[in-house]
Image: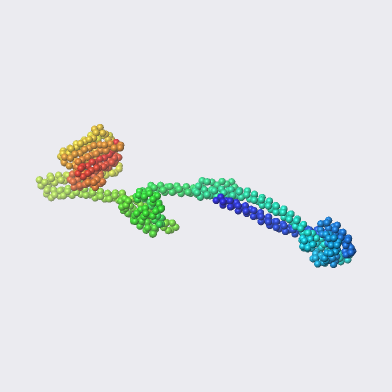
């Protein structure tokens, strides 16, 4: 870039010098020509005047051949004075005297009648010619005037000649002066152009330097300019442009940051591909779903990163038709989930240039829908069973069994049991819906856990005795917990109830507590039948029972553990179970210590 600036200065300097050269050259050329012409004109007229003076000195009788002594002495005196060669000829062209020849030499000189200047003079005109003198071997200027007699007849001619060398010498000296002043002008022009171009190049260099900074994205750089000319205006405009660009870029950056923040926070997965199905960008949710990083995905073909041909087909279709597609897909890999996929085309100049995919994980929504459906089905079923029985026995009684003294009480007892079941079921359902409503407020207080457990065990006394179950309460006497005493009582009741119900005869139950990283863990361990491994993950679901018939027979509703889970979670704790079939179960829950 620096070289370019030097080139610019070099060109400017050359231009300046060329202007000086051309203008000076033209002036010199015309000056020189004019000078030469004028000089020659002046010399000629001065020679003519001198010739007139000489002609006046000559009397007609002097122009005779035998009288040349006078003429000879005249030309020899005047010649050196006027610094010219003077030649006198008679009307026949014979040379009578010459200021630069002796009289003897004059006699030997050839006739001059043929010399053009002499011929003109002998015709009464002023003759002039520039000719190479074979006598003197140089270019000479000849001026000849007629010499007239008394009756105005031409009796001879006087010729003055001057070597042109002297004119050339004068011209040379003038040219030398012109040339020297030309060199001086050139030198001055060079120095001046250096100063001037420097003045021009400096702000231009500043502009070049700033433009380079701008192109590198540094818009904070400002071009300093104190001039009010076009370059100053250019600098101001560039500064304004840079400021404008900086503002615009900042604006775009902020918008971009907002967009990135939105994309990063979105629960939906976002994938943008170009028209060749190459991934341009993905958000972190996509990374989580498909187990890829943004860096791994960017620039690769969709199928290379996400090996799902269903989504690939959706992309291909959008890229081909430009039409919005919304579809629900079940993915088995990398995780088994249900996604709702919305794909729309990205247009540029009315042609499809890419595709935007919005992937929404609807597994949870679908799961909740299924749960709701199952719940309604379960509730209906649970209600229907006792209701059918009640209805059946009421009909039997009405149809005459009421008078059957032996069985009517048995039938009424069955109706009572089913009504109780219905009551239990409705109570459990109400508890559950109350616990799930989120409007529930816990009545928290500190209470002694052991005392609470002992009271509950007392409530199950008859069942414990009936099944000969040994129950061991290993809770420390002074252990106090904070929580809703009634609801935690319900938790313990349900767990102890199950431990009794699903225990074997002469089985055992142990209740103990452990403290684990800031939480207390309360466990109800029994020696019952245990829970098959496949059922364990679902055991806390509503209406989930390992053995439905047995549970019903024991008066269970299938909602007990579900209620336990809700209450414990409301207290900030967790529930869990460890169980092995045939070896018993350990149901536990934690509470903040
Ligand atoms: P319910 O006891 O009314 O049937 P729960 O929600 O309390 O309902 O329990 C759900 C199911 O979990 C029970 O039907 C039973 O199959 C199983 N279960 C619960 N506690 C135990 C336990 N201590 N031992 C074996 N199975 C149990």
Closer-to-camera residue (377/308): 308
Label total for image = 0
Camera sees residue 68: yes
The quadrant in which the C terminus is found is top left
Q: Is residue 198 left or right of residue 579?
A: right
**Which residue is at 88% across, 65% downward?**
65
Where residue 490 sits, quadrant-wise, is top left
Closer-to-camera residue (90/543): 90
The vertical placement of 79 against 114, above or below, is above
**Which residue is at 86% across, 62% downward?**
104
Closer-to-camera residue (369/246): 246
Colour scheme in use: rainbow
Camera sees residue 426: no
Image coords of residue 85 (percent x, y): 82, 59
Q: Is residue 395 left or right of residue 69?
A: left
Image coords of residue 241 (percent x, y): 52, 49
Image coords of residue 429 (percent x, y): 24, 45
Image coords of residue 366 (percent x, y): 30, 51
**Which residue is at 48% across, 49% downward?**
248
Where residue 325 sits, quadrant-wise, is bottom left
């Amino acid at each position: 870039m620096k070289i370019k600036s030097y080139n610019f200065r070099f060109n400017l300097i050359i231009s300046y010098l060329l202007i000086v050269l051309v203008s000076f050259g033209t002036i010199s050329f015309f000056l020189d020509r004019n000078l030469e012409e004028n000089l020659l004109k002046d010399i000629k007229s001065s020679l003519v005047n001198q010739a007139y003076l000489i002609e006046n000195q000559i009397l007609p009788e002097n122009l005779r051949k035998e009288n040349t002594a006078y003429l000879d002495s005249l030309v020899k005196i005047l010649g050196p004075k006027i610094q010219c060669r003077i030649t006198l000829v008679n009307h026949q062209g014979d040379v009578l005297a010459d200021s630069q020849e002796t009289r003897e030499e004059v006699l030997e000189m050839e006739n001059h009648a043929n010399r053009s200047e002499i011929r003109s003079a002998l015709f009464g005109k002023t003759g002039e010619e520039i000719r190479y003198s074979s006598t003197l071997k140089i270019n000479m200027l000849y001026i000849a005037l007629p010499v007239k007699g008394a009756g105005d007849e031409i009796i001879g001619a006087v010729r003055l000649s001057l070597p042109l060398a002297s004119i050339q010498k004068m011209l040379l000296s003038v040219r030398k002066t012109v040339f020297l002043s030309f060199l001086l002008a050139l030198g001055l022009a060079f120095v001046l152009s250096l100063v001037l171009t420097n003045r021009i190049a400096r702000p231009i260099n500043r502009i070049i330097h700033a433009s380079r900074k701008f192109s590198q994205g540094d818009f904070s750089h400002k071009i300093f300019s104190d001039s009010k000319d076009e370059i100053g205006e250019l600098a101001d405009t560039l500064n304004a442009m840079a400021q404008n660009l900086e503002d615009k870029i900042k604006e775009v950056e902020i918008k971009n940051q907002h967009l990135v923040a939105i994309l990063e926070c979105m629960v939906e997965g976002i994938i943008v591909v170009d028209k060749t199905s190459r991934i341009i960008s993905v958000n972190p949710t996509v990374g989580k779903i498909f187990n890829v990083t943004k860096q791994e995905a960017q620039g690769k073909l969709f199928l290379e990163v996400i090996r799902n041909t269903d989504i690939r087909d959706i992309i291909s279709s959008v890229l081909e038709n430009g039409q919005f597609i919304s579809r629900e897909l079940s993915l088995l890999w990398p995780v088994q989930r249900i996604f709702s996929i919305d794909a729309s085309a990205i247009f540029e100049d009315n042609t499809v240039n890419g595709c935007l995919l919005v992937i929404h994980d609807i597994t949870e929504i679908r799961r909740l829908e299924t749960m709701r459906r199952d719940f309604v089905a379960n509730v209906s079923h649970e209600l229907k069973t006792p209701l059918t029985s009640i209805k059946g026995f009421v009909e039997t009684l009405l149809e005459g069994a009421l008078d059957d003294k032996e069985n009517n009480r048995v039938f009424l007892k069955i109706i009572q049991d089913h009504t109780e079941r219905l009551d239990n079921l409705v109570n459990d359902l109400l508890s559950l819906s109350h616990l799930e409503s989120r409007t529930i407020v816990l009545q928290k207080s500190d209470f002694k856990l052991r005392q609470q457990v002992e009271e509950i065990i007392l409530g199950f006394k008859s069942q414990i005795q009936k099944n000969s179950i040994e129950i061991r309460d290993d809770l420390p006497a002074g252990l106090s917990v904070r929580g809703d005493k009634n609801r935690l009582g319900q938790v313990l009741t349900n767990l102890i109830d199950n431990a009794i119900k699903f225990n074997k005869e002469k089985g055992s139950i142990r209740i103990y507590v452990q403290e684990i990283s800031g939480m207390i863990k309360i466990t109800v361990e029994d020696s019952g039948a245990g829970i098959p491994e496949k059922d364990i993950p679902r055991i806390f679901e509503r209406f989930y029972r390992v053995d439905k018939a047995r549970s019903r027979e024991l008066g269970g509703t299938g909602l007990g553990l579900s209620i336990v889970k809700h209450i414990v979670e409301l207290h900030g704790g967790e529930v869990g179970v460890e169980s092995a079939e045939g070896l018993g179960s350990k149901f536990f829950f934690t509470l903040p210590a």
